[in-house]
Image (cartoon, rainbow, N blue to C red):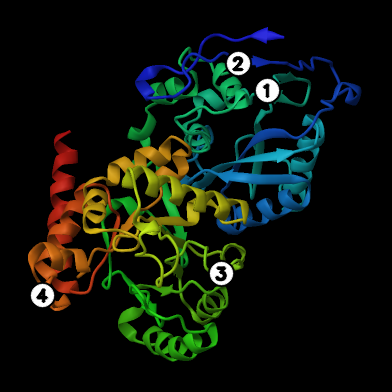
């Protein structure tokens, strides 16, 4: 047994700084692979990097993930999706890069063999080293083991110099190190401060958004760099729903919802001015989501984050569209009940409950790079809770980051428009009189990190958003 050095520097706010990591290492140093020394143990947690720059890159990722699942690799977490400039051999198309955490019973060389088979079956052949490829699958970590053989080195020997590998790898971690396996991964880095220190020295988050590395969300037929400007639901995204989710609203069936929704959706999609816009379907029914996407909707907006239809998450995974997961307790008829309005720390609890929905979505096959988070202003919240959320969006992100950096980087959507709490504060009982209050709350949300705002008065809020974005851009230039 080997005793590792103390980990987890306090400057990252990491919990568990006094822990040590004890791990068994398997060093495979033979000139040829000796399968008799393969790891024979229970499930091992692994990290696998993905890259593609030939053909339909996103489809290549989806196909590779499906083949991995069918081959005994149970994917549990996904990194964000990055479009990156090619490294080493620069005269080639841009790459998509990400990484996944998974659990497998395969030994390290068995796992390598499976990944190489997937690469070959997807059309990868010999060629220029670091050159174009439809899919590239690399083992970054394998359990607590350090492995060296003629054909496999773990940790992957060039992780530490590659931002396009490190960024999605960091996404798979949380600031709280809650397992010995993850602690060992930190100890195996080349930096005394672990993976966090190494990422900081490479440039960390300052690298994201520059020409060489963009964090993107796949939607429609393009990659959306959503952090560049605030999007407005009503101008950039048209949200169409056929079921009321107001407090105490009675539920209609999926069949009735479809009867109401589809004719409107089809008419909207046929409008010439919709050519450059996105359409989301607001539903908590999986059958409605499926039919709407078949008719042309680009996103699924689910106020229940999969809690009101047990088939929703699996359905969204199969549809390959972005998924807006909103925080709500109960359903519209119970969400404002006394029990559902109990919070000791609303931002922390909303973050925790939202993250649990992200976990379920990822285990169902929805990658983190397709998830948009909504803290659910006005749903299972009192006035003071809504205010705390509007001013506490950075807290929500930081709480989620303790468990998943990928989820903490997800686009954040807020929908305070004309909500009752604004009327209570401003003494405006009529919803149509709450637009100035809406603009104030939208402004606060954008300065707190919201990336998408859902509004009713499009013209005035678009102007407010433009001013907010201009101020944020000016501040970033000064920094």
- Residue furthest to the right in view is 36
Q: Is the residue under label 3 in contact with that under label 1 (CB below 8 Å)?
A: no
The residue indicated by pointer 3 is: 309
Q: Is residue 433 above or below residue 120?
A: below
Could you give the CA–CA distance between mark 2 and mark 3, rounded to whole angstroms?
Answer: 41 Å
Judge the density around disc 4: few (<14), some (14-19), many (≥20) Cα neighbours within 10 Å: some
Could you give the CA–CA distance between mark 4 and mark 2, rounded to whole angstroms?
Answer: 59 Å
Residue 21 numbered tag:
2
**Marks 1 and 2: which is nearer the front?**
2
Could you give the CA–CA distance between mark 1 and mark 2, rounded to whole angstroms?
Answer: 10 Å
**Marks 1 and 3: which is nearer the front?**
3
Q: Is the residue under label 2 in contact with that under label 1 (CB below 8 Å)?
A: yes
Judge the density around disc 1: few (<14), some (14-19), many (≥20) Cα neighbours within 10 Å: many
Q: Can you see residue 212?
A: no
Q: Is residue 135 above or below residue 218?
A: above
Query: Which quadrant: the C terminus?
Result: top left
Judge the density around disc 3: few (<14), some (14-19), many (≥20) Cα neighbours within 10 Å: few
Q: Secondary structure at mark 3?
A: loop
Q: Is residue 80 above or below residue 265?
A: above
Q: Secondary structure at mark 4?
A: helix
Using the rendered view, name the quadrant where residue 141 is placed.
top right
Sequence-wise, which precedes: disc 4 or disc 2? 2
The residue indicated by pointer 1 is: 144
Q: Position of residue 225 (x, y in %)?
A: 37, 53
Using the rendered view, name the quadrant where residue 129 is placed.
top right
Q: Secondary structure at mark 1?
A: loop
The residue indicated by pointer 4 is: 433
Sequence-wise, which precedes: disc 1 or disc 2? 2
What residue is rendered at 60% in x and 66% in y? 310
Q: Is residue 250 left or right of residue 50?
A: left
What residue is rendered at 60% in x and 20% in y? 184
């Amino acid at each position: 047994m080997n005793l590792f050095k103390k980990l987890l520097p306090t400057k990252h706010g990491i919990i568990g700084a006094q822990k040590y990591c004890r791990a068994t290492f398997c060093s495979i140093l033979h000139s040829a692979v000796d399968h008799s020394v393969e790891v024979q143990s229970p499930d091992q947690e692994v990290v696998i990097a993905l890259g593609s720059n030939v053909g339909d890159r996103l489809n290549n990722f989806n196909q590779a993930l499906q083949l991995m699942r069918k081959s005994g690799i149970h994917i549990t977490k996904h990194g964000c999706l990055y479009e990156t400039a090619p490294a080493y051999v620069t005269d080639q198309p841009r790459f998509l890069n990400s990484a996944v955490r998974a659990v497998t019973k395969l030994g390290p060389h068995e796992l390598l063999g499976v990944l190489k088979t997937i690469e070959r079956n997807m059309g990868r052949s010999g060629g220029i080293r670091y050159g174009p490829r439809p899919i590239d699958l690399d083992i970054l970590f394998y359990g607590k083991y350090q492995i060296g053989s003629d054909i496999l080195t773990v940790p992957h020997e060039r992780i530490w110099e590659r931002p396009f590998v490190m960024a999605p790898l960091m996404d798979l971690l949380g600031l709280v190190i809650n397992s010995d396996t993850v602690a060992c991964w930190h100890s195996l880095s080349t930096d005394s401060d672990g993976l966090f220190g190494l990422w900081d020295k490479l440039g960390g988050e300052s690298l994201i958004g520059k020409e060489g590395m963009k964090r993107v969300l796949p939607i429609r037929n393009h990659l959306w760099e959503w952090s560049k400007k605030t999007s407005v639901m009503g101008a950039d995204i048209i949200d169409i729903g056929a079921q009321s989710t107001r407090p105490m609203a009675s539920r209609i069936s999926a069949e009735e919802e479809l009867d109401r929704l589809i004719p409107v959706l089809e008419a909207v999609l046929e409008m010439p001015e919709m050519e450059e816009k996105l359409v989301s379907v607001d539903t908590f029914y999986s059958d409605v989501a499926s039919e709407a996407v078949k008719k042309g909707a680009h996103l699924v907006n689910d106020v229940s984050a999969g809690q009101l239809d047990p088939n929703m998450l699996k359905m969204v995974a199969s549809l390959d569209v972005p998924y807006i997961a909103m925080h709500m307790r109960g359903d519209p008829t119970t969400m404002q009940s006394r029990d559902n309005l109990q919070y000791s720390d609303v931002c922390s609890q909303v973050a925790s409950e939202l993250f649990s929905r992200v976990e379920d979505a990822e285990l169902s096959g929805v990658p983190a790079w397709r998830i948009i988070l909504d803290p659910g202003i006005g749903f299972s919240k009192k006035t003071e809770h809504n205010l705390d959320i509007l001013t506490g969006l950075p807290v929500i992100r930081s709480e989620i980051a303790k468990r998943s950096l990928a989820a903490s980087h997800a686009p954040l959507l807020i929908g305070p428009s004309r909500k009752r709490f604004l009327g209570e504060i401003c003494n405006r009982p009529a919803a149509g009189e709450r637009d100035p209050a809406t603009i104030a709350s939208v402004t606060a949300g954008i300065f707190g990190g919201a990336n998408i705002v859902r509004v009713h008065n499009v013209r005035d809020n678009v102007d407010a958003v433009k001013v907010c974005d201009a101020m944020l851009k000016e501040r970033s230039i000064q920094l």
